[in-house]
Image (cartoon, coloured by chain):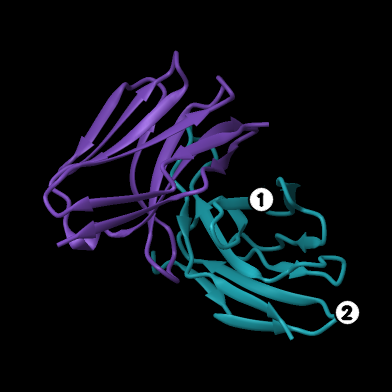
Amino acid sequence: GENVEQHPSTLSVQEGDSAVIKCTYSDSASNYFPWYKQELGKRPQLIIDIRSNVGEKKDQRIAVTLNKTAKHFSLHITETQPEDSAVYFCAASIRSGGGNKLTFGTGTQLKVEL
Amino acid sequence: DGGITQSPKYLFRKEGQNVTLSCEQNLNHDAMYWYRQDPGQGLRLIYYSQIVNDFQKGDIAEGYSVSREKKESFPLTVTSAQKNPTAFYLCASSIDRDRPSNQPQHFGDGTRLSIL
């Protein structure tokens, strides 16, 4: 099955700096890659996603890049703010019989320091 | 995502007891999913259902059971066979049927299950 690895497990940046989180996946059939933000004790919230027919997608301070050949994708957060502090999860999905199975990375604890 | 309701928020299980976690959605989504989250780990798929009266095992289905009698509801039962049930359980849903590509999954607020 699919295996998703995520690095780093913890990341500390100064407010205003950029943060980059990287993920690799194993199954070349994966074609959908969402990123979720989870604050302590709360639900994961979708912040951005990318499909395999696109190399990059941007939404204000957040961008995601995908390299299908190398099977890796990255989340970029610019001009970080304290409210960006949370755990971020990447995931990869294979479409299977009308639904999609998501395999998650182990998460990155991002801390934005003042 | 106010359209997905999980209950209860906290649940305690006694030795040898089955417990059922509720998940209801009013988003008219076709597919529903159950994930387990342990500290320091990502979410792992337990079961998923793409249509009423049909469901498939995920990666860690042993010790769990589900039903999908209504489109809106996808309850998860944690059976006594699940020896380490303490975790945060998350339900999700997505519009999937008749769509050409994967659709985003949206999550409920979760149920935290502990052993007494």
Image position, residue B42 (x, y; %) = 54, 51
| Chain at tag 2 | B
Residue sitting at x 60%, y 66%:
B89
Residue behind mark 2 = B16
Q: Is residue B50 visible?
A: yes
| Other residues around mark 1 within 10 Å, as few (<14) / some (14–19) / many (≥20) | many
Q: Is residue B15 above or below residue A88?
A: below
Residue sitting at x 74%, y 61%:
B67
Marking on residue B49: 1
Spot the cyan chain and give its letter.
B
Q: Is residue B51 visible?
A: no
Please name the amino acid that badge 1 sits on: Ser
Spot the purple chain and give its letter.
A
Give the CA separation, mark 1 to mark 2: 27 Å
Side of B30 relative to A37 (left or right): right
Residue sitting at x 52%, y 42%:
B96
- Which badge, 1 or 2, comes first in the chain's sequence? 2
Q: Tell me which corner region of the image, top left, top right, bottom left or bottom right, holds residue A64.
A: top left
| Chain at tag 1 | B
Q: For the residue labelled by badge 1, is the local secondary structure a helix, a strand or a loop?
A: strand
Image position, residue A61 (x, y; %) = 16, 44
Q: Is residue B93 above or below residue A102?
A: below
